[in-house]
């Protein structure tokens, strides 16, 4: 009869039955403790910052000028999250009673979740006496989790663990299978996020200076243009909009498929581009560019695959260029022209439908569509939509010349001044300050 009673379809789950044994005050205390423990997790500041950052990305994407007043609050909030994380790490090593209670609560939560999942799954195989024991000890552990001392919590955890081993251990599937299943799920979620939503990208060269400097890291919005099918260069449909002039994109180089490039879209399918010296015309309209500084200093870096950079080596050097503010289809951004070594290409070209024409903001130091995308052909090259990985959004990390700790890491430091900058200007910004 006991076995029949355990099969009643409307019976409560183990968790519901255990919580039913708690008073209203105990339930409130349990909820409070669980929220406190969530905030003690090292993932808490990371998760909170990520969520706020996503809101910032969305706002700036639709109204770029908001970054002028949101950037400082974002930096302040980011610093607060870093301090929050550092404080949690410090408490784990320095406050032993605090850490002991945190660990006891963590182990109790893990056990409650494991026991509830296993008991609900195998309820039909459990006798009523076994079910009652699991409910009673789960309720006791929940009470001690809310109000009990470390020692009392450990004792309740031990008792529920004994009941688990006695009644559930033999019913569960292989631990290796469960662990493997969990790892597969976590990996699938990570791949889904990288494939569909956001992916980080590090700037390896100076071809996009001064918008993006060596060591800047940006997030790439992989959702806006449409999701590429895995292991293909096919985008079956557009989700938000196709690429437009002024977008900074990361793409799989069609000339060198093993490389990812980052450039600015200058023209889209159907546009006719004409080049005459420094002058660029799109469909007959001259691209506007205003000189801001005749001599603007930028930091570049010496690096080669045959001589990899050591973290203590200061291999930064300065270059001088003219700084201009260019306006491309309503998108304002900085560009550099090097008067000492101009690298122009005269001629006219029409961009094929389904492709874009890209250029680096550092116009005389960029292997872009003008020069075969670095393939050595010297011919016009275009980027098909299927090769585009996504749109660069804002800088989330900057490890470049100057900044914090640069005297330790060979001139490379943490550049807080570049954090959360978008890929375009509001229009009124002054020339960027170059660190010494």
Image (cartoon, grey):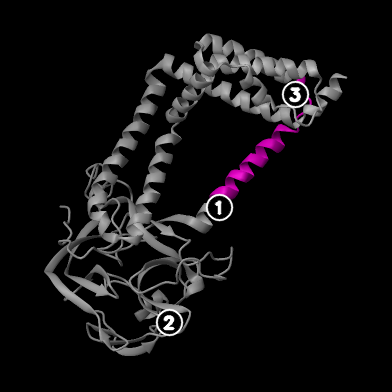
> Which residue appears at 38% of the width and 85% of the height?
271
Q: CA distance from mark 2 to mark 1?
A: 31 Å
Q: Over which residues does the magenta segment extend?
A: 167-190
Which callout, 2 or 3, points at the residue further toward the start of the chain? 3
Residue 91, how many percent across, how many down? 38, 22
* Relative side of 413 to 148, left or right: left
Residue 98, how many percent across, how many down? 42, 17
Residue under label 1 = 191
Q: Is residue 175 magenta?
A: yes
For discs 3 and 1, the disc positioned in front in the rendered view? 3
- Determine crowd level at label 2: few under 14, some 14-19, many 20+ residues with C-alpha closer than 10 A: some
Which callout, 3 or 1, points at the residue further toward the start of the chain? 3
Identify whether 126 is placed above or below 248. above
**Picture quarter containing residue 323?**
bottom left
Check residue 269 in the rendering and tell me which mark sits there, or answer none.
2
* Relative side of 24 to 303, left or right: right
Identify whether 191 is placed above or below 350. above
The quadrant of the picture occupied by the N terminus is top right
Seen from the viewer's position, the closer of residues 161 and 121 is: 121
Asked if labels 1 and 2 touch by Cβ distance under 8 angstroms, the answer is: no
Residue 229, how many percent across, how many down? 58, 65
Asked if labels 1 and 3 touch by Cβ distance under 8 angstroms, the answer is: no
Which callout, 2 or 1, points at the residue further toward the start of the chain? 1
Q: CA distance from mark 3 to mark 1?
A: 34 Å
Q: Is residue 139 magenta?
A: no
Label 2: which secondary element: loop
């Amino acid at each position: 009869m006991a076995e029949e009673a355990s099969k009643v379809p409307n019976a409560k789950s183990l968790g519901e039955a255990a919580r039913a044994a708690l008073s209203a005050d105990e339930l409130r205390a349990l909820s409070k403790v669980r929220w406190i423990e969530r905030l003690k997790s090292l993932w808490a500041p990371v998760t909170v910052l990520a969520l706020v950052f996503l809101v910032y990305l969305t706002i700036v994407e639709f109204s770029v000028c908001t970054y002028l007043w949101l950037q400082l609050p974002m930096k302040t909030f980011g610093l607060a999250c870093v301090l929050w994380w550092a404080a949690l790490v410090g408490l784990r090593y320095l406050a032993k009673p605090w850490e002991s209670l945190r660990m006891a609560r963590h182990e109790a939560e893990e056990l409650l979740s494991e026991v509830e999942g296993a008991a609900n799954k195998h309820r039909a195989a459990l006798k009523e006496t076994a079910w009652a024991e699991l409910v009673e000890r789960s309720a006791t552990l929940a009470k001690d989790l809310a109000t009990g001392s470390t020692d009392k919590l450990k004792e309740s955890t031990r008792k529920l663990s004994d009941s688990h081993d006695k009644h559930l251990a033999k019913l569960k599937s292989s631990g290796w299978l469960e662990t493997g299943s969990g790892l597969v799920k976590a990996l699938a979620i990570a791949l889904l996020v990288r494939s569909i939503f956001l992916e980080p990208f590090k700037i390896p060269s100076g071809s996009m200076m001064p918008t993006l400097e060596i060591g800047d890291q940006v997030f790439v919005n992989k959702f806006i243009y449409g999701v590429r099918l895995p292991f293909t260069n096919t985008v079956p449909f557009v989700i938000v909009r196709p690429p437009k002039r002024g977008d900074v994109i990361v793409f799989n180089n069609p000339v060198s498929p093993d490389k990812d490039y980052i450039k600015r879209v200058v023209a889209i399918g159907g546009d006719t581009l004409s080049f005459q010296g420094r002058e660029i015309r799109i469909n007959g309209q001259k691209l506007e560019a205003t000189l801001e500084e005749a001599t603007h200093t930028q930091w570049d870096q010496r690096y080669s695959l045959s001589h990899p950079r050591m973290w203590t080596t200061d291999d930064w050097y300065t270059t001088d260029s003219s700084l201009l503010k260019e306006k491309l289809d309503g998108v304002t951004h900085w560009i550099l022209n090097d008067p000492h070594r101009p690298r122009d290409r005269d001629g006219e070209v029409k961009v094929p439908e389904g492709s874009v024409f890209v250029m680096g903001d550092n116009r005389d130091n960029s292997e872009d569509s003008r020069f075969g995308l670095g393939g050595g052909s010297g011919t016009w090259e275009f980027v098909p939509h299927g090769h585009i990985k996504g749109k660069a959004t804002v800088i989330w990390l900057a490890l470049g010349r100057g900044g914090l700790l640069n005297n330790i890491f060979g001139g490379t430091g943490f550049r807080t001044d570049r954090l959360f900058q978008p890929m375009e200007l509001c229009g009124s910004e002054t020339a960027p300050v170059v660190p010494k």
